[in-house]
Image (cartoon, rainbow, N blue to C red):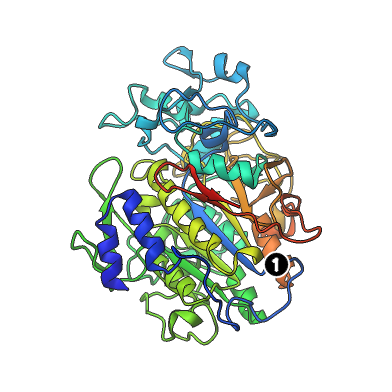
């Protein structure tokens, strides 16, 4: 498999995706499932027996779906919405033409980024800066606080005003097509403000506390006498062989612990996790890399994205390889990898007729959509390859795929969420980056923090979330309030694991079940897309 995957990486985007599908044995049609695999060993509350969470990087709702379902069709890939497509809470004519944001003394209206402008700058998306951008709920301070111009021309002359840019269906074509055939939520938020690591931890634990740092850092706040605090920034996991700088260890439980307690199969599949692979450019180990969309290279594996590496109970610090065949990945039979795998292992398991009950997927960095080193087109290639493979598998009629993003990257979004968790943190080192600023300096809301834990101001920025499943409502937009904890809650309720506890957001998160139609039988719906264009190449 390793030699084959190295060959695949040398191909162009479209050929790479086609070869990947062939490599995992899916090009010719559905596989025969191993009878014992993928059922998780227990009954489920819904017809969903397999949940796949694809967690991408750094996108606000308006940045990808602000004008959905209306595309300019002036460049890129043509997109024409179905006539009965519901509207979203997006960019109104008033917001597009008379926006309250200002830059360099002039109105900074949202503007469309063309297909040729898919690669952009990385914006400021720190915990405090994002709150300042919200400006007490006025949503009018983005260029001044999260906007970040960059060299190399990737701000396209807008400077910090690039933060107001958005894409439409001519660039994020696959995602708009998935929304047409499945379900989209326009009222989904990051559980808290801040960058990737808080988002990753909220996805799997509903909590960014207690974090114990290896040294002094303003990114862990409200430290008490026990040395633990709340994480508000990006830090690598302690013990990971690829980590660097100040690191943290998380206390408490995560969803993996709950699944283990019930004997339910699960796996974390991350790009670049297998350190034995040598990439076509000769890189290997922690330095496996690909070309970045904005030039240079980016390592495939980024430790501060690695959800389960932060918890001693679910960590695989040496990236040890599984001691079982792919047909048993994710099960308790694998006593070596501790449920931590490479993204290539996901395809290998699928080829072997195995889909764990719960899978968390992270693309190699160059395909994760993160501005500054990835872009929507590389991201599209990864998403379509995964979803085409799943739809050709025997598990499709019992699978639900949740697609969402870890944070907003600071990109403009016009909608503030409710303050469901207050916080009062003044960070004496740099409050503008690592302290609360939503309701004033050192303040977020007026309530009592959930479980008394400070440093978790939320909800944070609005983020897209899609459900792709034969059980999803068709061409449906949910307006139900939800956050990362809602995905946790769906998994917990489906397998009866109970809640995580310790102040996890899963206890207060809204439900996403209205995005499904569990009445009657699955309609076996499938939508196959071209990974380069995002356009349909087959459906049923």
At horizontal 69% and vertical 48% (from top left) the residue drawn is 482
Secondary structure under the numbered disc 1 in the rendered image: helix
The residue furthest right is 519
Q: Of 36 and 428, which appears nearest the observer?
A: 36
Q: Of 460 and 116, which appears nearest the observer?
A: 116
Q: Of 28 and 147, which appears nearest the observer?
A: 28
At horizontal 60% and vertical 82% (from top left) the residue drawn is 35
| 125 left or right, relative to 131 | left
| 397 left or right, relative to 382 | right
| 398 left or right, relative to 230 | right
Q: Give the x, y percent position of residue 25.
A: 43, 69
Q: Residues within 10 Å of mark 1 (few under 14, many from 20)?
A: many
Residue 67 in view here: yes
Tally the marks: 1
Compared to residue 337, the image places residue 186 above or below, namely above
Compared to residue 169, the image places residue 210 above or below, namely below
Residue 229 in view here: no
Q: Give the x, y percent position of residue 419.
A: 70, 41
Compared to residue 189, the image places residue 200 above or below, namely below
Name which quarter of the figure residue 38 lies in: bottom right
At horizontal 52% and vertical 87% (from top left) the residue drawn is 333
Q: Give the x, y percent position of residue 184.
A: 64, 44
Q: What quarter of the picture does the N terminus occupy?
A: bottom left
Q: Which residue is mark 1?
A: 492
| 517 left or right, relative to 295 | right
Name which quarter of the figure residue 286 lies in: bottom left
The residue furthest left is 282
């Amino acid at each position: 498999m390793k030699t084959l995957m190295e060959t695949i990486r040398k191909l162009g985007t479209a050929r790479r995706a086609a070869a990947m599908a062939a490599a995992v044995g899916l090009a010719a049609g559905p596989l025969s499932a191993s009878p014992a695999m993928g059922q998780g060993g227990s009954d489920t509350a819904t017809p969903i027996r397999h949940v796949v969470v694809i967690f991408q990087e750094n996108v606000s709702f308006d940045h990808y779906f602000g004008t959905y379902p209306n595309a300019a069709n002036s460049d890129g890939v043509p997109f024409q919405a179905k006539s009965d497509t519901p509207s979203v809470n997006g960019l109104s004519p008033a917001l597009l033409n008379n926006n309250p944001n200002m830059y360099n003394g002039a109105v900074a209206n949202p503007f469309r980024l063309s297909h040729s402008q898919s690669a952009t700058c990385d914006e400021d998306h720190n915990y405090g800066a994002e709150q300042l951008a919200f400006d007490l709920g006025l949503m009018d301070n983005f260029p001044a606080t999260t906007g970040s111009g960059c060299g190399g021309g990737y701000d396209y002359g807008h400077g910090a005003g690039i933060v107001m840019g958005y894409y439409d269906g001519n660039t994020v074509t696959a995602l708009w097509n998935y929304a047409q055939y499945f379900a989209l939520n326009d009222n989904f938020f990051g559980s808290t403000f801040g960058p990737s690591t808080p988002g990753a931890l909220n996805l799997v634990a509903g909590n960014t506390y207690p974090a114990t740092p290896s040294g002094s850092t303003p990114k862990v706040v409200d430290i008490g006498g026990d040395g633990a605090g709340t994480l508000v920034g990006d830090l690598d996991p302690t013990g990971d062989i690829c980590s660097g700088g100040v690191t943290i260890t998380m206390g408490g439980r995560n969803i993996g612990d709950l699944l283990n307690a019930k004997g339910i199969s699960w796996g974390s599949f991350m790009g670049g996790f297998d350190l034995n692979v040598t990439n076509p450019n000769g890189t290997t180990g922690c330095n496996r890399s690909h070309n970045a969309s904005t030039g240079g290279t980016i390592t495939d594996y980024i430790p501060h994205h690695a959800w389960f590496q932060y918890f001693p109970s679910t960590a695989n610090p040496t990236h040890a390889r599984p001691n079982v065949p792919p047909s048993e990945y994710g099960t308790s039979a694998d006593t070596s990898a501790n449920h931590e795998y490479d993204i290539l292992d996901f395809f290998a398991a699928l080829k072997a007729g195995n889909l764990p009950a719960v899978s968390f997927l992270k693309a190699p960095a160059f395909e994760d959509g993160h501005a500054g080193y990835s872009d929507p087109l590389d991201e599209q290639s990864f998403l379509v390859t995964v979803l085409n493979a799943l739809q050709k598998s025997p598990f499709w009629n019992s699978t639900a795929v949740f697609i969402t993003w870890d944070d907003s990257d600071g990109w403009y979004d016009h909608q503030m969420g409710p303050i469901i968790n207050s916080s009062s943190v003044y960070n004496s080192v740099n409050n503008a980056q690592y302290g609360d600023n939503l309701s004033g300096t050192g303040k977020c809301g007026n309530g009592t923090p959930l479980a008394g834990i400070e440093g978790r101001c939320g909800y944070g920025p609005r983020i897209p979330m899609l459900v792709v499943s034969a059980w999803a409502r068709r061409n449906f937009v949910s307006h139900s309030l939800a956050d990362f904890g809602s995905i946790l809650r769906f998994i917990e309720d489906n397998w009866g694991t109970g809640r995580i506890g310790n102040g996890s957001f899963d206890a207060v998160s809204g439900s996403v079940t209205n995005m499904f139609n569990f009445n009657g039988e699955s309609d076996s719906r499938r939508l196959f897309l071209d990974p380069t264009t995002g356009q349909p190449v087959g459906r049923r």
